[in-house]
Image: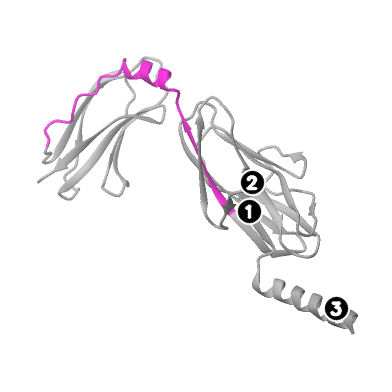
Amino acid sequence: MRKIISFISFFLLVITQTLFSQSFSLSNHTGVPIISGTTINITGDTGTIICQKIKITNNTLFNKNVKVKKIIIDTLPNTENDFCFGGECHIPSIYITPNNTIIAAGKTDSSFEGNYRPHKVAGTSTILYVFFDSDNVTDSVFVNIAYTAIIPSEIKDDVSNKIEFPAVFPNPVTNYANFSWTIPPNTKTARIVIRDLVGAIVKETIIDSQSGKISVDVKNLQNGLYFYSLLINEIPYITRKMIIKH
């Protein structure tokens, strides 16, 4: 009778776990739980590798064959990303692990690392990682990682000292916004962007000279508050407010 009761209890436990619980759960390297579908923000230097470690736990009573898939949400040009899982590290062109990693029942695997190489490019790149049962691909958990690379303050300060970017004239602006600039001679890319209150770019002007002036036509923009920025090598060095009033 005890064997029958034990078997029934085990059977009910398996059914309950299958119906009402996730097979997997995630946590960071210190063990803090990560809710599936959330975004982790991590910041590092533009000259280093930015790494995020994640633990995955098998919450079931059975061993699981697990794979990882990366999905590019938004990455900056000239940056690279790769990941390691199950004792294997993969080159940037690999988007899904070729081999299964077995995670035993009730055990936690700590082998995942998401690696981001900014290659001196400042800004944020976002990558989605999906951890799934290779025998049942719908059984999965996932997390977004937003890697933000920032330029070292001493380098940014050195460039800032070589920039001249007077305030827009006039302000409030009626029909034309007048800008002038002087930027370092070794600048690779530079541009002036105007954004609305929600951050969308509404005007953009490429700068192809070390110094100059330009008038930007804003007659088609609605009255209101805007922000304009000077970006050098894709880094926003100066941002100011601008009012448009026709």
Q: Is residue 240 left or right of residue 4?
A: left
Residue toward you, 138 or 51: 51
Callout 1: 10 Å neighbours few (<14), some, many (20+)?
many
In which image quadrant can residue 112 be found? top right
- Boundaries of the magenta span: 143-171
- Compute the Cα span from label 2 to label 1: 7 Å
Residue placed at 19% from the left, 42% from the top?
Answer: 218
Residue 244 place in picture, x, y as percent: 14, 43
Residue 26 place in picture, x, y as percent: 63, 53
Residue under numbered circle 2: 54
Does the magenta portion include 153? yes
Residue placed at 61% from the left, 38% from the top?
Answer: 81
Q: Earlier in the sequence, mark 1 or mark 3?
A: 3
Contact check, label 2 and label 1, Cβ < 8 Å: yes
Residue 18 place in picture, x, y as percent: 71, 72
- The quarter of the picture where the N terminus appears is bottom right
Residue under numbered circle 1: 26
Residue under numbered circle 3: 7
